[in-house]
Image (cartoon, helix red, strand yellow):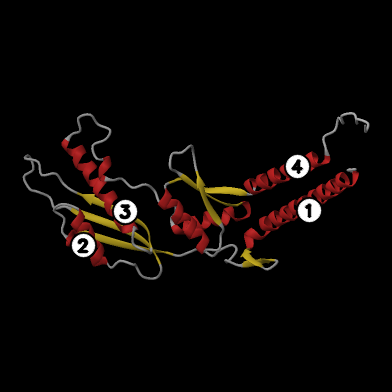
């Protein structure tokens, strides 16, 4: 009968290697999380997608992830080295867009609203809906609509005309919407408003020069944005370390199995 070996106080080498692999995986995940910085938060899904597309178009790697505990909001994160460039790009693009008022907000906040308060709330709601429509046009970065809808109370001797003013900020040399188109859109969305009573002002926004210039850096055979080169090198180094640990664990397991098979009678 073979002698019985006393139990060893230290864990087997396979267990130690498994622990080392788990620690390496944890360190790799922590490294990826620590190198990311949020540049926009509290966004709905379409706005988060719009932010990601704008950053990717300017050679800045970005990803969308949940923000909060299941409230349907998202945030956009980039690498630490590209955070300042991403914030500059978002400022140039007017993103994320502020939440506009809507007709659903009319009548909130007052138990018994007055006639003038209801009229002002209606004008704000209509202006918000018109701003949303203008922002759907490609090339429009920002839109502000101001409506003047005078009340037609019985005490007014002369009824005032409704009027509106629109401020459009656009990308490029020319506005994506003609002045006549904006006037027709606003006049059709507000009661008793004629297109000739709408004043449209357009402003061109020039993109500021990029700090990185959209340059690409090469990490081996990969071409990535210049700001993403350093984090990618760290991730690749961690992957090489992980592969080395896996290869060592496989070799150790093979040698251990070989010794066990050789020790059998």
212 left or right, relative to 109? right
Residue assigned mark 3:
132
Residue 158 placed where, x, y %? 7, 48
Judged by depth in the image, the label closer to the viewer, 4 or 2, is 4
Q: Which of the pair 77/212 is nearer the observer?
A: 77
User: Which residue was labeled with disc 1?
Assistant: 247
**Residue at position x 45%, y 54% in the image:** 49
Can you give x and y, in whole percent of width and height, for residue 162 in the image?
16, 52
Q: Residues within 10 Å of mark 1 (few under 14, many from 20)?
A: few
Q: Position of residue 224 (x, y in %)?
A: 62, 64
Label 1 – label 4 distance at C-alpha:
12 Å
User: Along the line of sight, which residue is nearer the eye, 192 or 45?
Assistant: 45
Q: Are marks 4 and 2 in contact (CB under 8 Å)?
A: no
- Helix, strand or loop at disc 1? helix
Describe the element under mark 2 as helix, strand or loop: helix
Residue found 58% across the figure and 48% down from its top: 37
Q: Earlier in the sequence, mark 1 or mark 3?
A: 3
> Seen in the image, is 249 located left or right of residue 210?
right
Nearer the viewer's eye, disc 4 or disc 3?
4
| Residue that label 4 marks | 18
């Amino acid at each position: 009968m073979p002698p019985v070996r006393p139990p060893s106080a230290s864990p087997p080498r396979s267990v130690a290697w498994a622990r080392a692999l788990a620690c390496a995986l944890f360190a790799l995940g922590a490294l990826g999380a620590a190198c990311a910085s949020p540049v926009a938060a509290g966004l709905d899904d379409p706005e988060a997608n719009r932010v990601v597309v704008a950053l990717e178009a300017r050679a800045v790697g970005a990803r969308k992830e949940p923000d909060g505990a299941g409230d349907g909001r998202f945030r956009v994160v980039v690498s630490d080295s590209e955070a300042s460039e991403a914030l500059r790009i978002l400022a140039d693009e007017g993103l994320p867009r502020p939440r506009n008022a809507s007709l659903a907000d009319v009548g909130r906040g007052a138990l018994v609203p007055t006639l003038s308060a209801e009229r002002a709330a209606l004008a704000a709601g209509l202006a918000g809906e018109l701003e949303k429509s203008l922002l759907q046009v490609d090339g429009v970065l920002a839109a502000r609509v101001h409506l003047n809808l005078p009340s037609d109370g019985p005490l007014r001797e002369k009824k005032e005309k409704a009027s509106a003013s629109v401020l459009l900020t656009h990308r490029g040399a020319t506005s994506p919407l003609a002045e006549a188109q904006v006037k027709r859109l606003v006049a059709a969305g507000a009661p008793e408003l004629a297109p000739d009573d709408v004043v449209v002002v357009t402003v061109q926004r020039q993109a500021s020069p990029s700090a990185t210039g959209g340059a690409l850096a090469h990490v081996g055979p990969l071409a990535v944005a210049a700001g993403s080169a350093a984090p990618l090198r760290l991730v690749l180094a961690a992957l090489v370390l992980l592969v080395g640990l896996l290869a060592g664990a496989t070799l150790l397991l093979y040698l251990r199995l070989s010794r066990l098979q050789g020790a059998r009678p």
